[in-house]
Amino acid sequence: MPQSLAKILVHIIFSTKERFKFLVDEQIRQEMHAYLHTVFKAFDSPTLLVGGVEDHIHILSSLSRNHAIAEIIREAKRNSSKWIKTKGGIYRKFHWQKGYGAFSVSQSQVNEVKNYIAM
């Protein structure tokens, strides 16, 4: 087989440092979700949905064949942290908590995970 094909869906969760509610402002939260979508896309891991609340993020993504999940998340956290700090004010102190959760999702459960993230 001359091609490689992989469709691995992953539900990723990570939090702000000490679960501080940095993402209270709806506009900033939506911008963060859009920013994370862009970072994941750049690492060949298109998102199906990015959501979350004031202190943590949920991402449903198709996992890249070319990049390790740890690399993608590290870069997503690093880049989004640098970006939000440019907003000034309280965001200058923004940090993500170390670590993350990543869970495989079967195709039959995609809608349930999307509904959970959208809540």
Image: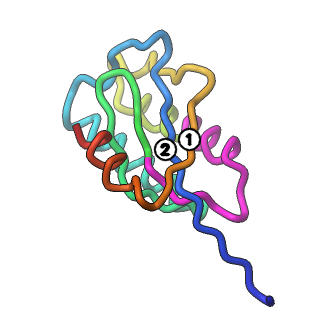
- Furthest residue toward right: 1
Tell me: 109 left or right of 26: right
Q: Which residues are magenta?
A: 60-78
Q: 24 left or right of 73? A: left
Whether residue 3 sits left or right of residue 81 in the image: it is right
Q: Check if residue 29 falls in the magenta segment.
A: no
- Extreme residue toward the front, this view: 108
Along the viewing direction, whichever of 8 and 41 lies nearer the viewer: 8
Q: In the image, is residue 70 part of the stretch drawn in magenta?
A: yes
Kind of element beneath mark 1: strand
Where's the C terminus, which quadrant?
top left
- Dot label at residue 11: 2
What residue does disc 1 label?
103
- Relative vertical location of residue 101 with respect to residue 69 in this rendering, above or below: above
Q: Which amino acid type is marked by label 2?
A: His
Label annotation for residue 19: none
**Marks 2/1: CA–CA distance:** 5 Å
Q: Are marks 2 and 1 in contact (CB under 8 Å)?
A: yes
- Name the spot of residue 116 as percent of width and height, x first: 30, 40
Give coordinates of residue 111: x percent, y percent: 32, 55
Q: Is residue 14 above or below residue 63?
A: above
Q: Secondary structure at mark 2?
A: strand
Residue 95 placed where, x, y %?
51, 21
Q: Residue at x 44, y 50 (%)?
A: 60
Looking at the rendered structure, the number of numbered marks drawn on it comes to 2
